[in-house]
Image (cartoon, rainbow, N blue to C red):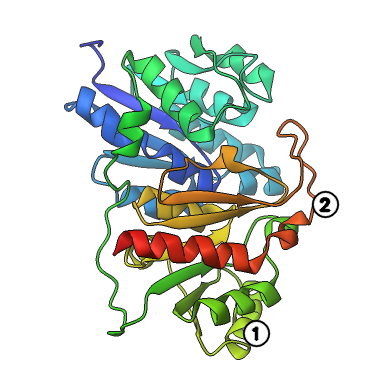
Amino acid sequence: MNPNIKKIAIVRLSALGDIVNSAVVLQFIHKHYPNAKIEWITEEVFSPLLKSHPLIHAVHCVNLKKLKQQKSFSALKQTIQHLRSLGEFDIIIDMQGLIKSSVVARFLGKNTHGFDKDSTRESLASFFYKTSSKIAYDANIVRRNSFVVADALDFEITDAMLLEKEKIFPSTTYPFPPTQKKNIAIVIGASWESKRYPKESIAELANSLKENALIIWGNEAEKEDALWICEHSEFATLAPKLSLVELVSYISSCDLLIGNDTGPTHMAWAQNVASITLFGPTNERMIYETPKNIAMHSPSDVDIFKINKNDFSIKEIQVEDIVRNAKKLLEDIE
């Protein structure tokens, strides 16, 4: 434990699922450094989720995607000036391990910590760190996130601690209509088409479960698919359009979540809600499995070092197998 650490910067720019899986460290940092101020640097689109967190003192936004599109030197200069104006940090931890995140970390100050050159897919990122941690790149993502932070701050985050974690994000009870049925959130979107479970299978899943299937969508294309599912299942209901903060409360109020490998699906684990994550081109490395947060994988053999985005094998996961696991999880809740 370092008594001199009073101000901590965490760099985790994107994406939603990675930010959700990274934020678990906040409660453990606070336990060991209760008086330290934790500040988070992220992409602007994710800032509302983090700004609502009681353990984060401040959230600072960068918009690297916009900078890349604009190719504006003045905008880049303003971003650098903003990062350098945030004051002195006792330690800056880059949880992302990419060149872009390590550069952002370095603009914040000299006391940077991240993954070593053998622990990330962009080894040049380690050049920008003062100190580093070594952990296998193909290790579980939650364990990697936890290790790099705990190692930087000289304490340990164990599996027992992760299994007994508190909810990661604050939430309120979502006002679902009274019902005798279970509320099952189903996440249909994903960053790649090959991660998505077919809408036809989701309609079949809703019809087989015969509970309240709440179809979560994130854009207009997903909304069209969600409406199609609702038209083909009397048990399916279109979820409302939700902000990130609202989405946390919505998922937190459900009995079970079933979804693809994507940010909203990871929120179930974050909020201690039972979940089934469906994998095709990726694998269970992306989640932290517990007795009530389980993975189901297609027959595909995934190489985490060379992801095949054209692997559509997720469609081979059988609906009846999902139903069986869902019913078991629902029984365990009761």
Q: Specify the quadrant of the image occupied by residue 219.
A: bottom right
- Under circle 2, the secondary element is loop
Q: Position of residue 263 (x, y in %)?
A: 52, 53
Q: Is 232 displayed left or right of 156 in the figure?
A: right
Q: Residue at x 46, y 57 (%)?
A: 275
Q: Position of residue 189 (x, y in %)?
A: 61, 64
Quickly name the residue at label 1: 228
Crowd rating for badge 1 (residues with CA inside 10 Å; few <14, some 14–19, many 20+): some
* Lower position in the chain sequence, tag 2 or tag 1: 1
- On the rendered image, what quadrant is the N terminus found in? top left
Asked whether residue 39 is in view, the answer is no
Quickly name the residue at label 2: 310
- Under circle 1, the secondary element is helix
- On the rendered image, what quadrant is the C terminus found in? bottom left
Q: Is 4 displayed left or right of 82 in the figure?
A: left
Front residue of this view, candidates 193 and 59: 193
Front residue of this view, candidates 267 and 163: 163
The residues bearing labels 2 and 1 have C-alpha atoms spaced at a distance of 24 Å
Q: Residue at x 71, y 43 (%)?
A: 71
- Looking at this rendering, what residue extends furthest in the right direction? 310
